Amino acid sequence: MFIDAETLDNQTTFTSDIAVVGAGPAGIVLALELANAGYEVVLIESGGLHFSAAIQNLGEASHFDPQFHAPMSECTRRQLGGTSTIWGGRCLPYDPVDFDRRSYIPNSDWPIGYEEIAGYFQRACDYFLCGKSEFKIENIPNIAQKSIVPGLPDAEVLTSTLERWSLPTNFGKEYFNDLKQSEKIKLLYNLTCTEIETSEQNDQVELLAAKTLGGKTIRVKCQKYVLAGGALNTTRLLLASDRRHPGGIGNQSGLLGRFYMGHLSGDIAVVHFTTPPQDTVFGFDRDPDKIYLRRRFSFTREFLHEQQLPNIVAWLGSPKFGDPAHQNAILSSAYLALSTPVLKNFLTSTAMRKAAIGKEGQGIYWAHVMNVLKDFKQAITFVPRFGYGRYIAKRKIPALFVYSAANEYPLHYHSEQVPNPDSRISLSNDQDELGMRRLNIDIQFAQQDIDGVLKAHRYWDQYLRNHNCGYLKYVTDDPEASVWEQAGDGFHQVGTTRMSEHPKDGVVGNNCNVHGLDNLFVASSSIFVTSGQANSTFTIVAFALRLADHLKKIIEEKV
């Protein structure tokens, strides 16, 4: 049942077995899993069934540094499906090394091991529609060339690890009918939770207070409560619920809102291969189920420990669309499409468009037109084929890659950010339209983050040279300055309610339970202790599945 909260009477109280706050991937998976087990679920979504600028504005931060953090309007979504509605579809789990005890990375100790979450990867793949839980190219039977270029073996450096790609899966669209037809799920939309109210003993959640933009106050009273509204918005709700809990619910440690992490990513080098250009795997592979796969440069678990490296990967990219100096008709066609007012918002999200095209201007625009005219035959052949594969086919091409006759490709890195207690979010005095205090975002990168990226590139360069397969060419004379200039995130929001065995060390326990309250849980990447090399979406869903199993077990035990 779908219910627009604006149609309800003021002061309505809903009751159910379990309340799930947030209808993004984690919230939808939890609702479906729990409903299929026979439990009544209230799924609460701040947004509507479609995008609303007024509701999206509720999540804007009061302060953030645009050099290091994207606007919340670009990296989150308040609507059914959550941020999956603007997600690219990249699926890969955290690695075993992310759960290792690494003395060279302070504050990186998880209270659980890799094996405790790895068992949920296939179920997560099923929800993402990304095929088998297989992330190594040597185990994909239909792909003959296992190395990214001939003669480059897997040793301390690997080119055999994979990313899988979903359709991409918009969870709101993909699971719309499952949610609507479930007799156990009530989706309350256009309803924003503004406070968690606890008992006089402060050991139980008694109800959730929520509001609509139209001025209604709604209450939700259940046995168990799960916060799945995204990392920063989940933490914001905990911080704001401070009437009985100084500093916010779950803040006995003083760490609520701290250890905010994302990833470092960018391009500081191009890789020049000295192998035959036609043998370079520069784009996507596909497995027997036609799932798109992408190879990466990475390191073995042992080598990361030995060299005291953060977890980092890199993959071959394409030249920036926005620079007409590439003189490529295909890339210029893509630039022109993404710069056309009628098309740009339809073709991709604002953040992805900005990243792809870079600077805009009349001079640049006409230079791209000239590139297309110089090789019009190539452009006119490419556009319909790629357009169908990217926007019409059911399993869409995830990204655009072009062949390089020079055998040179940008090397795009994606690196772990080291946990830092001074990197944090907090509440400001500014309030949104519902009276909730907005966030101050202070993400901070450290020299250790920068050094890790530089060291990884030196090892990749040396490995290519040792095997006579190529080398790296840095794009500036000061790679360190380039890493600092490119440091920034906001799209992969990690930390701020970190998992710990003891309340003094974090916010949630081993089973995602908020320390000190036995009926409140968190299902978001805010619980992650490290950021790893992977974007967080896939692992969030794996943890949501683990939490669903835990909730089913403890509810059954009480019965």
Image: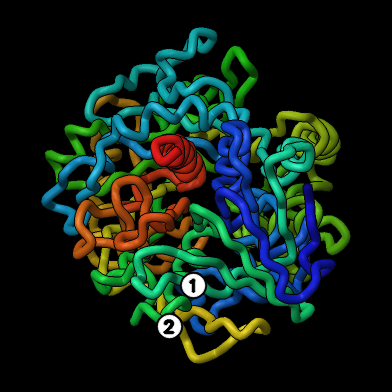
Q: Which residue is mark 1?
A: 197
Work out whether residue 306 or residue 25 is closer to the camera in this orientation and state it: 25
Residue depicted at 78% across the width and 47% down the height: 1
The 10 Å Cα crowd at callout 1, few under 14, some 14 to 19, many 20 or more, is some
Q: Is residue 378 left or right of residue 290?
A: right
Rendered location of residue 522, percent (x, y): 44, 55
Q: Is residue 524 left or right of residue 449?
A: right
Residue depicted at 24% across the width and 24% down the height: 155
In this rendering, does residue 289 appear at all? yes
| Contact (Cβ within 8 Å) of mark 1 with mark 2 | yes
Residue depicted at 25% across the width and 41% down the height: 112
Work out whether residue 159 or residue 36 is closer to the camera in this orientation and state it: 36
Check disc 2 and give the amino acid type. Answer: Arg
State whether residue 119 is above or below residue 211.
Answer: above
State whether residue 415 is above or below residue 404.
Answer: below
Rendered location of residue 411, percent (x, y): 44, 44
As helix, strand or loop, the secondary structure at mark 2 comes to loop
In this rendering, does residue 457 appear at all? no
- Outermost residue to the right: 342
- Outermost residue to the bottom: 429
Q: CA distance from mark 1 to mark 2?
A: 9 Å
Q: Is residue 42 left or right of residue 389?
A: left
Work out whether residue 268 or residue 164 is closer to the camera in this orientation and state it: 164
Image quadrant where one finds the C terminus: top left
State whether residue 262 is above or below residue 123.
Answer: below
Mark with earlier residue (1, 2): 1
State whether residue 377 is above or below residue 458.
Answer: above
Check disc 1 and give the amino acid type. Answer: Glu
Q: Which residue is mark 2?
A: 243
Work out whether residue 346 or residue 362 is closer to the camera in this orientation and state it: 346
Display colour scheme: rainbow
